[in-house]
Amino acid sequence: MQEITFDQYAPQVLQQLPKGAFLTVSHGGRDNTMTIGWGSLGVIWGKPILSVLVRPSRFTYGLLEASGEFTVSVPLAGMAKALGVCGSKSGRDTDKFTAAGLQKLPGIKLATPVIGGAGLHYECKVVFKQPMNPALLDAGINAASYPSGDHHTIYYGLIEACWLE
Amino acid sequence: MQEITFDQYAPQVLQQLPKGAFLTVSHGGRDNTMTIGWGSLGVIWGKPILSVLVRPSRFTYGLLEASGEFTVSVPLAGMAKALGVCGSKSGRDTDKFTAAGLQKLPGIKLATPVIGGAGLHYECKVVFKQPMNPALLDAGINAASYPSGDHHTIYYGLIEACWLE
């Protein structure tokens, strides 16, 4: 394990995100992970921030709202099959770790685990969140990304740890 | 001039932001630039997005609301003095380009100029924005960054061009 600065792998994160990364949450003894394709790395309020978007309909949403923390594990190579499983099943009725053959590793700062083998991990504490207001969104994006509503809540996570396996 | 992918200089952007970058807006024949220290680079809605934060009290705010576009020029070396000027004067009563000895260069995609000499430029069209809801912000950050209210509006800019001078 090697701790790195949050920005060191920024190009790799931004290039991998559209191919998928694991967003993992944990609350009350229940863990879940989902595949995300969107996110943002920044400096906001003078702090390193990783932003992710979660729709209220997701099983992840309730756990994240309850725990106030999440991890993002970015595959630095492969894992396409596991990303596919975690992007198509719901944690409501599936243990996705078993279904996708994923290994949980403990976080180094937070209680939420990370996904072993991905290679790059961010551990984040939610410091701000905001449900998207569709009225303020570009009409074309709204039509393309939200044909049935279900707009995301955007979670701003203070990066408490960033590390390579 | 050399166009690059939006993520190529992500570490440099994230490292420079706390030291300052130029956020430039233009509307109705009036240009203004301000120093920003916060921002975020991401992939959202399947698109490259640069997010910036502007307080409603800023002169920049009205121009940005009216134009719906902005540029961010990231100094790859130096420019500390000009960043200081553009972070302390207001465009309401000062032509900051003259005061800071800055040269406007035309954008390659948008009508808003960029700041010559900075080296790295993003041209962005606002596709989403959201005034921050203080009730959803971490209390410590709220106290530290907003002692007098004046919470930011977060602007999500679709990156139409990213280029090196």
Image: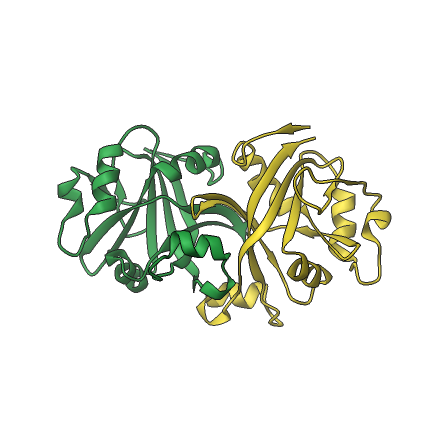
Chain colours: A yellow, B green
Number of numbered markers: 0
Q: Where does residue A8 sit, x and y in percent of width and height?
A: 53, 31
Among the 4 quarters of the image, the one containing residue A162:
top right
Which corner quadrant holds the N terminus of chain B? Answer: top left
The reply to whether residue A82 is in sight is yes
Judging depth in this view, the residue of A72 and B158 nearest the camera is A72
Is B157 on the left or on the right of B28, as rendered? Answer: right
Name the residue: 49% across, 65% down. B135
Q: Where does residue A137 sit, x and y in percent of width and height?
A: 47, 66
Judging depth in this view, the residue of B74 and A32 nearest the camera is A32
Name the residue: 42% across, 37% down. B13
The reply to whether residue B109 is in sight is no
For residue A103, above or below residue B160: above
Which corner quadrant holds the C terminus of chain B? Answer: top left
For residue A158, above or below residue A61: above
Among the 4 quarters of the image, the one containing residue A146:
bottom right
For residue A31, above or below residue A102: below
Judging depth in this view, the residue of A5 and B65 nearest the camera is A5
Q: Where does residue B75 sit, x and y in percent of width and height?
A: 32, 34
Q: Where does residue A163 sit, x and y in percent of width and height?
A: 63, 33
Among the 4 quarters of the image, the one containing residue A75:
top right
Name the residue: 67% across, 61% down. A66
Name the residue: 35% across, 36% down. B19
